[in-house]
Amino acid sequence: MKKILVALVIGALLFGAWWAWDRHVMTLTPEQSYQRTMSAARLGDEGAFVGGFTADSQPLMRSLLALARNYPFVQEDPYRRLVMVDVVDVQVNGDSAELMIQQRNRESTVPMLLEDGAWRIDAFALEDAFGKRR
């Protein structure tokens, strides 16, 4: 019985160390951060989806999500615009990065910023980038 308890404690400690390493030490690439944010959107995890945006952008994204959810005639659905795409290219320049994404035959740029040790999408620059391509 004592051996089982020791094994469980060691297992819990190893899991805790792995979780801390994954969440707080390891920095994801811009592409990995983008994919994690889009996975949250696909799974319907609105909190994790909004958390993938910069602190300045999060209130805007919450508002857009609320509009899309409550008013079906609103065409600006952030999920649809970002989720069903492929990342084609990534360019990192210090604390900023640009992802080139492609949806069918249309390419767009997704600007990202390194904020609090994690890459996050800048929604204000994103709207500028999407507006240039219309």
Image (cartoon, helix red, strand yellow):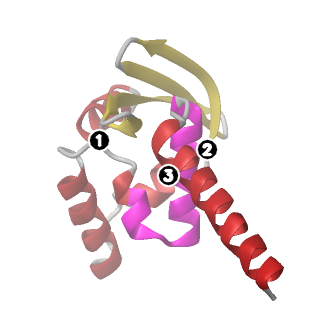
Q: Dividing the image into 4 quarters, which one contains the N terminus?
A: bottom right
Q: Quadrant of the C terminus?
A: top left
Q: Which mark is residue 85?
A: 2
Above or below 48: residue 92: above
- Marks 3/1: CA–CA distance: 13 Å
Identify the mark nearer the N-term, 3 or 1: 3
User: Residue most toward the top?
Assistant: 93
Q: Give the alpha-carbon distance from disc 2 to disc 3, as whole Å.
A: 13 Å
Judge by depth and name the residue closer to the eye, 119 or 108: 119
Q: Looking at the image, which is closer to me, 42 or 48?
A: 48
In the rendered image, residue 47, in percent from the top left (x then y), is placed at 37, 66
Tag in front: 2 or 3: 3
Amino acid, disc 1: Ala
Q: Which of the 4 quarters of the picture holds residue 131?
A: top left
Residue in view at x 40 percent, y 37 percent: 118
Magenta span covers which residues?
30-49
- Mark 2 crowd level (few <14, some 14–19, many ≥20, 10 Å Cα): some
User: Does 34 lie within the magenta span?
Assistant: yes
- Occupied quadrant, residue 126: top left
Q: Which residue position holds label 3?
A: 37
Q: Residues within 10 Å of mark 1 (few under 14, many from 20)?
A: many
Q: Is residue 124 above or below residue 77?
A: above
> At 42% from the left edge and 61% from the top edge, which residue is drawn?
48
- Compared across the picture, whether 2 is left or right of 12 comes to right
Give residue 123's mark. 1
Q: Residue furthest front?
A: 2
Of circles 3 and 1, the one toward us is 3
